[in-house]
Image (cartoon, rainbow, N blue to C red):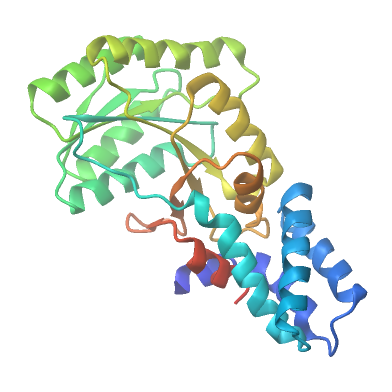
Amino acid sequence: MDKLKAGLRKTGSNIATVFTGTQIDDQLYEELETALLMADTGVKATAHLLQDLRRRVKDSKTTEPQAVKGLLIECLTDLLLPLQKTLSIGEHQPTVIMVAGVNGAGKTTSIGKLTKHLADSGASVLLAAADTFRAAAREQLAVWADRNTVEIISQAGGDPAAVSFDAVSAGKARGKDVVLVDTAGRLPTQTHLMQELSKIKRVVQKADASAPHEVLLVIDGNTGQNALMQVKAFDETLQLTGLIVTKLDGTAKGGVLCAIAREKPIPVYFIGVGEHLADLETFNAREFAQALLS
């Protein structure tokens, strides 16, 4: 919670200053609207939050600006609650998790952290280095595999779909609990690369008809509304099942989760609040709302 508070301080301080006045009036709501929009909460989510907040203030007959802050935490919690969901492992053997994201979002690092999270909970993990486009991607994933003492399937310059197929087949043969497939970072506008992602998904289904069981997108919390556009584009291609939101430890745009909740409510399984292996937190709506306004 402390890390989350520290990470969201830039976002939160901009919003919290709105409640330092002495009265609840139109100016307070206008300042709050500006602060929420600056935090990349998005137009739709901001309008929804303000409407909900005005109703709660009226119903509770609140007269203190500081008390309004408490009501806003309730509004935020209710808005974000649909995003709160636990990643479930064990229904399938192995559970195949495909991970996508644009370059620089922290995808490979998040896979390393997720591997540790799964291994710590007793799951045996196999990594698939299907990011064959980026020169150092295999090596980077191999370092994470080494740190977490898990096996990795990779090929020098191999076809990403073939590597994914081999990994899922190996995961089944070796009785692994989880196969994590790292795919190449790409922009949603790169049509040929987005088609490659679809191909990986199709080929994985040939190795296991029920897979992939989870399709996760890693998004950078710093990119604000751009992150929402990525969620929409990748969901169209891959039918996403969950999100990992990274780099929330230094952004003033933490409100983007509100925009996602309002416009594309795909579960947020984890949030990244630091550089270390353990800095991948399961998403909790109330904790996030409290940290945002602390």
Which quadrant, please, contains the N terminus? bottom left
Residue most extreme to the front: 59
On screen, residue 259 versus residue 135, left or right, reads: right
Along the horizontal axis of the image, is 201 left or right of 90? right
Q: Where is residue 43 in the image (x, y as percent from the top left)?
A: 79, 49
Q: Is residue 59 above or below residue 102?
A: below
Using the image, determine if residue 277 lies above or below residue 286: above
Vertical order, 186 against 121 (above or below): above
Identity of the residue drawn at 50% across and 49% down: 83
Report the front residue among 142 and 111: 111
Residue 2 in sight here:
yes
User: In the rendered picture of this protein, how many numbered marks are placed on residues?
Assistant: 0
Is there any visible trace of residue 158 in the rendered image?
Answer: no
Query: For this view, does 199 lie left or right of residue 66?
Result: left
Pinpoint residue 62: horizontal percent, then vertical percent: 74, 85
Quarter of the figure with residue 52: bottom right
Q: In this view, does 154 lie to the left or right of 54?
A: left
Residue nearer the viewer, 255 or 81: 81
The location of residue 138, given as percent across then percent down, is: 33, 27
Report x, y in % for residue 122. Answer: 14, 49
Q: In which quarter of the image is the C terminus?
A: bottom right
Q: Which residue sits at x=68%, y=78%?
A: 69
* Residue at the spot 14% in from the left edge and 39% down from the top edge: 124
